[in-house]
Image: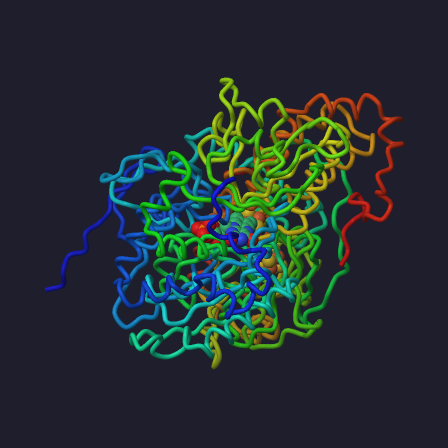
Amino acid sequence: MGRKLLLEHIHVPGINTLAVYREKGGYRAVEKALKTMSPEDVVEEVKKSGLRGRGGAGFPTGMKWSFLAKPEGVPRYLVCNGDESEPGTFKDRYLMNNIPHALIEGMIVSSYALGANTSYIYIRGEMMPQIRIIENAIQEAKAAGWLGKNILGTGYDLEIYVQPGGGAYICGEETALLESLEGKRGNPRIKPPFPAVAGLYGCPTVVNNVESIAATVPIVNDGGEEYAKIGIERSTGTKLISASGNLVKPGVYEIEMGLPVEEFIFSDEYCGGIANGKRLKAVVAGGSSVPILPANLITKTINGNPRLMTYESLADGGFVSGTAMGSGGFIAFDEDQCIVRNTWNYTRFYRHESCGQCSPCREGTGWMEKLLYKIESGNGSLADIDLLWDIQRRIEGNTICPLGDAAAWPVAAAIRHFRDEFEWHILNPGESQQRNYGLAHYADPLEPVTQ
Amino acid sequence: MAEEIQKFKVSIDGIAIEVDPGTTILNAARQIGGDIVPPAMCYYSKLEGSGGKCRTCLVKVSKGSEKDPRPMPKLVASCRTTVMDGMEVQNITSPDVVDARKAVVEMLLINHPLDCPVCDQAGECKLQDLGYEHGAVNTRYEFERRTFDRVDLGDKIQLHMNRCILCYRCVFTANQLTGKREHGILYRGDHAEISTYIENALDHDFIGNVIDVCPVGALTDKTFRFKNRVWFTKPVDAHRDCPTCSGKVTLWYKGTDVIRVTGRKDEYDEVDEFICNTCRFEKKHTDDWVLEHPTNVSDQSVIASNHYHAFNPPAVIQENPQLKEANVEQLARSEKLK
Ligand SMILES: Cc1cc2nc3c(=O)[nH]c(=O)nc-3n(C[C@H](O)[C@H](O)[C@H](O)COP(=O)(O)O)c2cc1C
Ligand code: SF4
Ligand code: SF4
Ligand code: FES
């Protein structure tokens, strides 16, 4: 059994309440940090832990914290990114829903480390139940003296506010999130300056994912070194994986980093194999934006080594024969799934969610969607595949924020690994036209867009 | 004694220049001038926060700085990237940049109709120039383009979103010059639209400037719209004593009639000073103005191309000796072109 740090008590009845959370050792980290550690000590422990951001990019959290500018007389902010919009990723809401105090406790510890006296938790607007749960947890914590003025008599003050987002994927991008938090249209900012220097209201700001913030609790409790003992190489600790698709047991799992992918998919402790006795065809390992891998490359790398659930191992082979850990949205496809249709579906999403600032992303995502639909519906030509390849290549790397890349990668990987399937659609138009997957209720993307 | 500011050395396509710290790559290139200046569709030096969006000005930084000579991993927007000491930049000498620019032009033209023959901006359109320099002859785009109805933003300005490239310049102009925000972008991605708050009219003394900043023909002056092709007109710099703005403008003559008034623009198509609506829309008689001289127009521009017709100085401006002299000079030049 893998060790659990975040979800250890998930099945304890009432763990969402402060009383039960305390019974299970909750808020020990706050007491320890505020009473026995300096903010610098906390940053040091997080550095030692090797924790990497769980929001997608995997940037070392301790290093990010140490970049925070500390000018005199200017407030600093911690902003928790609870937007969670990457298709296939649903771990943060699971955590917020079931153990809200794990996030609040992490927020207090992290805010203390950063010297922030006001912190925000930005949660996607559609997640109304989670917003209420978190607000309720804040009230409970405040009533018990874990928040507010002079916490535990240590002289440290902290207020945490919940801000519902408007429900746009782009508002998960950290600078767009800050714009949105300031009450503006959620357009990503052009960097530099980075949030660590000029973030919320122009002040130094750290933006961290829900899971990253929650992970600071066990790090403070047990020490960074202890945390770093779990996992391998530069992938330390545990990771929440949201598994979906054609699996026997989809759900949110906490794994120890380094677990073989094969074991994750097929063992009974985790996903229990592919549903309905089908064969595995492909996996998107880290949320819809990371490259899809065919079954033979997801369990083994191109060199024949077992592929592990770590940042390094998943990325082994680069984007040619590897993929990325991303946000941990693990989507499995069985042999019956159509990669072209799936890619079209992702692209539909990115087209809809592009903020529209950059020309290549604004126009290119729409173009890709139309071409994918054309191919999927049996109206494509072989030249369309090359055109599609060329368009994604010209979006990638040329935009303000990584959404452009996120839109390009799935298309590139699908063509790279499943070109024959694109060709099949084109060469068998009659058959592909008959495969009506309930497409009728989708808007036809070839119709001009009107709002 | 004022402290001497340390200058940064930067080279663009192998041409070296020293600039003040904080200068962007684009502005450093503009100080050198010529072909190595990246095109800019969304940046506008007079508008705070502009730039970074259209991606036409992408360049390659092949050496980051003297201290950290590593190249930058991706192409960068030159309009928003400041130079470092010792930086080396490639613009037209980099195949990657040329390719990226081609890509941007192709993307921009997906939803921008090639209706230059009937567009009011023809002859003054930066996208037209860009398309000419970097575009492909054939489009690879075969789907229906987005279309919109025309919208009147007040009685003097018309918006036709079909041509809009979402550069945000007009939004920044309206926000920064008028102080009252009622104009912005609705929706996202390729369904984004320029709009006023519930189809409000834009009424402010300086709102007419949105027309001048629009790089394409999406925002047009209803008092001039389709009255003439710009190359049949003759631009003349003039001024008046205006209580609202500097009163320094360009008058666009057709024969003896002033058919349009705009701000004066520099070689990068940016206005020198924003002008008020009264000067722009209501002062269309030569009597309203003190004429200075014919506007300096680059020989490359189509606006210059038809000047040999108009170079017989029109009657009304014959009184101005300075102008007359300049006319003679220009006439001689255009004679040579014949
Ligand atoms: C288009 C886009 C969407 C994103 N959405 C999210 C999100 O929903 N949640 C999240 O935590 N990070 C998201 N990110 C990553 C954030 O920008 C940022 O890197 C992250 O919140 C930092 O937290 P971490 O260091 O703890 O991972 C997104 C990034 C992009 C480019
Ligand atoms: S890449 Fe796309 S989402 Fe990101 S800023 Fe550009 S247009 Fe907006
Ligand atoms: S209307 Fe013109 S200025 Fe405004 S965003 Fe569109 S192209 Fe730019
Ligand atoms: S001019 Fe630089 S991105 Fe538009």
Residue A234 image offset from top left, x and y in percent: 38, 37
Q: How many marks?
A: 0
Q: Does residue A143 lie above or below B251 as drawn?
A: below
- What residue appears at the point 59 percent right and 43 percent down from the top-left corner? A329
Q: Nearer the viewer, residue A109 or A122?
A: A109
Q: Does residue A412 lie above or below B298 as drawn?
A: above
- What residue appears at the point 37 percent right and 52 percent down from the top-left corner? A219
- What residue appears at the point 87 percent right and 37 percent down from the top-left corner? A436
Q: Does residue A139 lie above or below B250 as drawn?
A: below
Q: Nearer the viewer, residue B22 or B258?
A: B22
| Residue A428 located left or right of residue B79 | right
Residue A256 image offset from top left, x and y in percent: 47, 40
| Residue A312 located left or right of residue A254 | left
The residue lying furthest to the left in this view is B1
Q: Nearer the viewer, residue A366 or B175?
A: A366
Q: Does residue B31 lie above or below A336 as drawn?
A: below
Please identify the quadrant where the N terminus of chain B is shown: bottom left
Residue A201 image offset from top left, x and y in percent: 42, 68
Q: Nearer the viewer, residue B269 or A110?
A: A110
> In which quarter of the view is residue B156 placed?
bottom right
| Residue B31 located left or right of residue A351 | left
> In which quarter of the view is residue A123 placed?
bottom right
Regarding residue B162, the answer to whether it shows in the image is yes
